Every structure is written in structure tokens, then in C-alpha cells.
Image (cartoon, coloured by chain):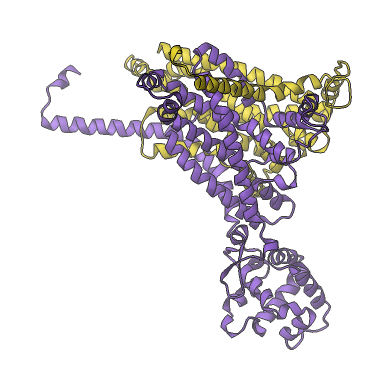
Chain colours: A yellow, B purple
Amino acid sequence: MSGAITGTEKAWRVVLYVVAIGGFFFLVAPILAIVPLSFNDGQFLTYPLRGVSLRWYEDFFFSGTWMSSIRNSLIIGVVAATIATFLGTLAATGLWLADFPGKRFISAFLLAPMIVPMVIYAVGLYFYFAPFDLTATFTGLILAHAVLGTPFVVITVTATLSGFDRTLIRAGLSLGASPIRVARSVVFPLIAPGVIFGGLFAFSVSLEEVITVLFIGGPNQRTLPREMFSGIRENISPTIAAAATIMIVLAVLLLLSAEFLRRRSSRLQAKG
Amino acid sequence: MAEKMLVGPRQTRSLKRDLARAERKRKRNAFLLVLPLIVFVVIFFVAPIAGMLERSVVDTDLMETWPKTAEAVRAYDWEKGAVPDETVFSALAQDLSRSYEDRTAAAVARRLNYDISGGRSLVMGTARKIARLDQPPTSWRDTLIEIEPDWGRAETWAAVRRAAGPLTDFFLLQTIDHQRDIDGSIVPVPTERAVYLQIYTRTFAIALTVTLLCLMIGFPIAYLLAGLRENTANLLMILVLLPFWTPLLVRTAAWVVVLQEHGLVNQMLQFLHLTDGPIRLVYNRSGVIISMTHVLLPFMILPLYAVMRTVPPSYMRAARSLGAPPFTAFRRVYIPQVMPGIAAGSILVFIIALGYYITPALVGGAADQMISYYIAFYTTDTVNWGLAAALGTGLFAATLILYTIYSRLVGGVRGVM
């Protein structure tokens, strides 16, 4: 191969590598650039730093609004992700078990919450929830975020199931176990990493969602991204950088556990 | 099972029936597992969206507040004249004074104001003045026209007829810069009011630019990753997944900080003597394009990479050994094989970009806002729900068409990511 490489091809290769490496830099650099600024002693979000200080973290952790926004984000995210994981796992299993009429349409339909512009959904909820007094409630936001999380659970659990060996189910049934017992003791342990991965995905969707919070969240449901939205819009301060850094750490933790689970579930698939 | 091996035709038939029944039961049970999510999505996703989109054609403000007028306007034979007779005017007078007393006139005033300038003051002013009349006049027609000469104009009554409900095409026409004239035929609006097609064009232009940039940066990245050993590729993939998992607000904040007047990018440009002073990179179009490209790039890389991994390198080698120049081999052998990935990634990025709201709202200027911004604006700021819904309908239709193409392309759940 290497003998056939011409000058132009080499030049193209160099261009390709330069763009790709530039692309990696473009993806990661701005996210990493904000981290040191949160430790800056100065008032402004600019380099060079004027000494290292934790004052903005102090600001963050001793502020009632930021703390309650973290609490709200966690409440909404955990409950919404749990609902999404439960419904999404059931649905993915059903889609995998048998071919029934309209299955293609149904799976496309179930992924729609991922695609429909969020403003349309949020404005729709704003009108829809009002007569039921669900605007400005946790219940309303949890329901909305649960809907938004379900496609991600359906996708990840479907991917996990696609590597699942169906003979294990037949083996379980032929040995006299009830279908529920088979689901609990054979299927679920094997797909659990995929299910948890889907749940983490749904949680992170809720954790970053801000548009439905803007439309149907009240002053008591201000989440972390909602506070950041006001902060960026009104006065971008180093406290925002501290909040961003905390969210980046959270994202890294989610990413690492998701990657761990994904590899675990693909290893199981290889065995099955 | 052994004794069932010897079966006659009758048993075969019943066995077939049993099998078919078992199969049906299996399908039904599988469907019952999907059903809860379908119901959940219908109640909490489809219904709210349908309710929102419905507002683009349902127009009942006037009908509900002024039932008599709406009925009289519908019953009147408009062939007789563009300004109606006493029956319509007296219905209007009754509705006006009643709605003024129970303070509902504002809804109609607002609705008419969407259509004709001065509609609000026309309604509220007339209502106030007839409340002061000592006794009902002999001719409401003459009195109302005397109080507010606009009631004698054909344009006013054309607007009332358009608002009489229950259905209207007023808002949808408005979003494509058209309206109905006095005769009811569809004509373009005057140029100073023609703003919405421009917003649509701007939205599509931003989404297209972002998609092309994502493809230009995403293609080399995916290509590079696909050529590496799996462990190395997985490691580098973290650089793609980190922004993917980082919340949108964090990435947007990061770009505001990096692109601002004294931010890193400007410092670097000045350090390299590429510019003398700071250049404006944020709160304008370049800020929107840069940060949206950053946010959407993983959505391009992931499907591209998934397809590129499946392309065997032997095809390219075969093309080369058969004498194809490198670029020809790349264009005619490699590109067609990764085309599904290019198409899937591009449509996905384009669809998501079309509906963007937060990023342009935070890093864009007034001239960089996309459709979603105006939907939000007309919903909460000016309370013109019909127009918000009509703009939403356009955006929704575009999304739905592209999504249909997309799901045909990738085929159901499995191929999405």
C-alpha cells in the first residue's frame, strides 16, 4: 500500500489529520477553558488568572438559590428517569419480543420526543397543563422530563437486547419457570447494564433540559440549568463558571459510568 | 412431543390453528408491553402538541366573547355591501356593552388588533363611549359610525368576518406573509409587514450552515476514528462524548466566555497579530454558528462513525490496485458506502438545528433568532397564541417530513445511534 501513496494523497491525508485534530480541539477546548476560570480570584472571566481561590465555589455552595436549584434538578431528574426507564424498558422488550403490525411506525413514533422541537412541546404543555393545575408543579415537570427521556431508554435497551440470545428464554421456560420468573432471573440480569445506561441517559436529558422549565416551571422549580440560563442572560459571573465546572464533573461521572456499563453489556453480548 | 409426530390431516389443521393462536398470543403480549409507553406518550406528548398546533386554525376569541355579532356576521348577505346593515350593528352594540361590563372585551380587542392596526383602540374606545349613552339610539349603525368612523370602513368588517371563527387561515397565511383582502382572495402582505418568510429563510440558512460545518469537521474525525484500532478509537471517542454529555447550558456559557471581547479567542488572535483590536464574535451570527456547530457535532460524528466502521478497507485497496487514482477511489468507492451515514448524520443535525432556541437566544443578537424564538416570544410576550401556533405548525411540518425521511433511512429504532 505505502508504495502507492502519491504526493497529493499525502497532502490530503495531512489535511484530514489536521482538520480531525483541530476538530477534537474544537470539541473539548471551550469546555476545559471555563474550568480554571472558576478558580480565578479576579472578578472577570478572563485569562490570565489573578491567583487561585475558591471564593466562587463558596458563593455557589452558600447560596440558597443555587443549592435549591441543585435539589430541584436532582428530584426532577431522578423521578423522571425512573419513570422513563420503567416504561422504556417494557416497551423495548415488547418491540424485541415479536413482530406485530405497525411495529416500524410505533418505534418511529416512540422516538419522536427526541426530534420534535422543544419549544413546540413546551408551549403545548404550557396550555395543556394549565386546566389541570400542573403548571409550576414538580409533577408537571417530572412528567415532561419523563417523556423526553423515554426515547433514549428505548434506544439503549433495544441495542442491548439485540445481542441477547433468545434460546435462554426458551431454556428457562422449558425448565418450568414462569414467564415472569424468566424475565426476572434470566432476562433482566443480562440486560441490566443496558437498562441502567438508558436510565443515566434519561437522567442527563432531564439534567440539561431548560426549555420546558422556562415555560411550565414556577419559581419553586428553578433547576440548575434554569439558574444558569438567567445567569448567562443577565450577568455572566465567575459563579456561573463554578456551576458549569460542577456540571462538567457530573457529566464526566455520568459519561464514565455509562461507558463502563456499555462495555459491560457489549461484553455480555459477546459471551451470549 | 413424540406421540404427536404421527398425526393425520385433521390433527395437522388443529395443530396449525394452535400454532397460529399461540403466535397471536405472543404478539399480543409483546404489544401489551409497549402499550403503557404508547399511552404515556399520547397523553403527555402528542396531546399537548396537538393542542398547541390546533390553535393555528381554531379562532374562537370573537365568537365566544361576541356570540351575537359572530352569528349576525355569518348570517348577513355580504353581497349587499361591505358595511353591514342595522341587524349586525345592533348585535355588535349589544355584545360591545355586555363585554365591556363583564370586562371580556379585551380579548376581542386583542384579536382584532392582530389583523388591523388600531383594532384594540377601536373596540375599547367604542365600548367606553356607548357605555356613556343615556338611551339606546334609533340606529346603532349611524351612531357607531359616528362615534368611530372606522366602523364604516370595509376593511374593519373584513377583519371582523375573518375573526368570526370558528376556524381561520389568518395566522397560517400570516406566517407565509400573505393575507386575505376584502374580497377574500389571498394576496401578499405589504412589504413592511412581510417578516415571517425571512425568519423561516434565516432559520433554514443557519441550520444548513451548521449542518455543512458539522459534516466538514465531523467527516475527518469519524474517518480518523474508524481507521484506528478499537481500543484507541474508544479512548479518543471520549473527546466526542464529553461534549455530548456536557449540558447545553454549560457549553453555551463556555462559548460566551471564550468568544467574548477579552476572551481566549480574541486574546489569541491579537497575540498572533491577526487582528489589531478585539473582534465581535458573540451576540451575533458567528457566535450562533460556532456554538451550534459545537453542540451538534457529536450528532454528526456518531452515525458517521457507526457506518464507517462497517466499511471493509479491502474495497478501497481493490479500487487502488485496479488503478483508480486515490481521489477517484475515494469518491466512487468509499463515499457511496458511507453515504447512509452522511445522510443520517446530516438530516439529524439539520432537524435538531431547525428547532434550536436556547443557544441563539443566549449567544445571538436580535437578527440571529430562529423560528423557535418567535414561537416563544408570541406565546409569552405578546400573547398572540394563534401566530405562535401557526409558526409552530410550519416548524413541526418541516421536522416531521425530515424525520420521516430519516427513519426510512436508518430503519426504526436500531440504527439511530
Query: Camera-side residue: B408 or B105?
Result: B408
Residue B11, above or below A268:
below
The residue lying furthest to the front in this view is: A7
Q: How far across and how far down the image is residue B304, in percent?
A: 50, 27
Residue B51 appears anywhere in the view: no
Where is residue A35, by image quadrant? top right
Q: Is residue A111 left or right of residue A237?
A: left
Question: Residue at horizontal 82%, vertical 32%?
Answer: B276
Where is residue A233, by image quadrant? top right
The residue lying furthest to the bottom in this view is: B138
Residue B6 appears anywhere in the view: yes
Q: How far across and how far down the image is residue A182, in percent?
A: 41, 18
Q: Quadrant of the N terminus of chain B?
A: top left
Query: Camera-side residue: A193 or B183?
Result: B183
Question: Residue at horizontal 70%, vertical 19%?
Answer: A249
The residue lying furthest to the left in this view is: B8
Residue A105, above or below A77:
below
Q: Is residue A213 left or right of residue A52?
A: left
Q: How far across and how far down the image is residue B170, in percent?
A: 61, 63
Query: Camera-side residue: B274 or A53?
Result: B274
Question: Residue at horizontal 65%, vertical 46%?
Answer: B372
Q: Is residue B336 left or right of residue A244?
A: left
